[in-house]
Image (cartoon, helix red, strand yellow):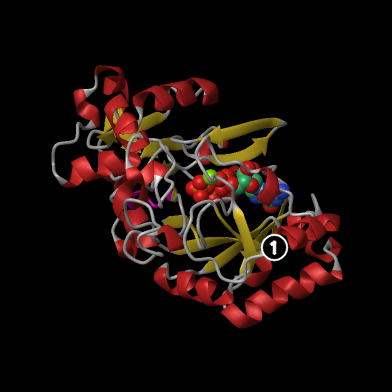
Amino acid sequence: MSCTIVCGGFWGDEGKGKVVSYLSSTDKPDAAARTGVGPNAEHGFIFQGKKYDLRQITCAFVCETAKLFIGAGVLVNPEIFLKEVEETKTQNRIWIDRQCGIIEKKHIKAEHSSEYFTGKLKTMGMGCGPANAERANRILKIAEEIDELKPFLTNVSDELNDVLDRGESVLIEGSQGCSLSLFHGTYPYVTSKDTTASTLAADAGIGPLKVNDVVVAFKSYVTRASPGPLANEYSFEEIKQLGLQEAETAIVYERPGGIRRVGRFDFQIAKRALRLNSATQIALTCIDKLYPECRGVKRYEELSAKAKDFISNIETKLKVPVTLISTGPATHETIDLRETKL
Ligand code: GTP
Ligand code: MG
């Protein structure tokens, strides 16, 4: 039996989707579930030459034998879900919980005209905040009330616990990041629920003692799409010098001020994230953005000396093994050190 959770250690966009695509294509979990807030998170990676940007379906779909789920804690926009089912051709092996909350047009509209979106929070505009507010008030529609979703309904907690009880494996894909947690993040510049591993397990309906591994994903630097505090922020000049193009070009959805800011790897925040999530492993992503010579490298020995120093400094300071190193957006642009480090 094994249950692994992949979650974010900074403010989201750490590359959890890419990490999940790698873990599922190599480990072939029997079941995988997407957890977290809902379609406000986009998980991008390249698999067999095709780019995917998934908002609802777990990136574990790349493992064709895995049963796929969306946990009860997750908000579902039926239109986006059905489009992604088609794109990933997963009609016959995907299920959502009867009690997933449903995002309707009114929630999107409400968010767009609210201060969440236009004011200081600058939220994603996918309707998640207003929907979760209705959910807390017990007036939100749930998946079993939506006709188009009927073929996909199940009790995800029962399904996943059955898988674990049979001695099989489950992979849980979180979304957002630790510092965006409603409880533990940089309130009020946070998302509409907790984002730590405990809540991700609860989203899927799995008890804490069933979880064996928690992989916390960190980018090699910190990015933040939302306003709010960001220590050690790079200036645009430094970003240019470092070639961190992302900061200048990543206009996150069409919303005011939607530019990702970039900061140096933050050890204090990382340490806290490892505790909050009881991390057993670190997945370090985008090492190629900091050290372009490392792009696409699949063996540790082939990393540059600077990159190796950077990684060993992280391990020394944080005392959790860096088991996965992502060197590009494609699933197999990954260095896997689990056999030697665990
Ligand atoms: P959220 O739940 O939205 O926080 O998402 P996430 O953690 O899954 O990350 P997301 O996919 O939003 O952002 C990461 C982006 O970087 C995606 O476009 C990935 O394809 C890309 N990416 C992931 N890992 C790497 C990497 O190692 N190198 C490079 N160059 N790109 C990467
Ligand atoms: Mg994203």
Q: Residue at x 36, y 63 (%)?
A: 187
Looking at the image, which residue is at 28% across and 50% down? Answer: 205
In the image, residue 182 lies at what x, y percent? 33, 59
Say which quadrant the N terminus sits in.
bottom left
Residue visible at 53% across and 51% down in the picture = 225
Q: Amino acid at mark 1?
A: Ser
Give the camera-side residue of 273 and 171: 273
| Residues packed near mark 1 inside 10 Å, few (<14), some (14 to 19) or many (20 plus) | few
Instruction: State whether residue 47 appears in this view.
Output: yes
Q: Is residue 20 visible?
A: no
Percent across and percent down for residue 327 are: 74, 53
Q: Is residue 235 left or right of residue 114?
A: right
Tell me: residue 153, above or below residue 137: above
Q: Main secondary structure of the magenta part?
A: loop
For residue 86, above or below residue 274: above
* 210 or 95, nearer to the observer: 95
Quadrant, the C terminus = bottom right
Dot 1: element: loop
Q: How many marks?
A: 1
Q: Is residue 267 above or below residue 218?
A: below
- Judge from the rendering whether residue 81 lies leftward or rightward of residue 147; answer left or right: right
| Region in magenta | 165-169
Residue 264 drawn at (x, y percent): 65, 68
* Foreground of the two, 52 or 98: 52
Quadrant of the rendered image containing residue 282: bottom right
Residue that label 1 marks: 235
Q: Quadrant of residue 201?
A: bottom left
Residue that protrudes farthest toward the top in the picture: 147
Q: Position of residue 42 (x, y in %)?
A: 51, 40
Which quarter of the figure has residue 189?
A: bottom left
Judging depth in this view, the residue of 85 and 222 nearest the camera is 222
Asked whether 168 falls inside the magenta stretch, the response is: yes
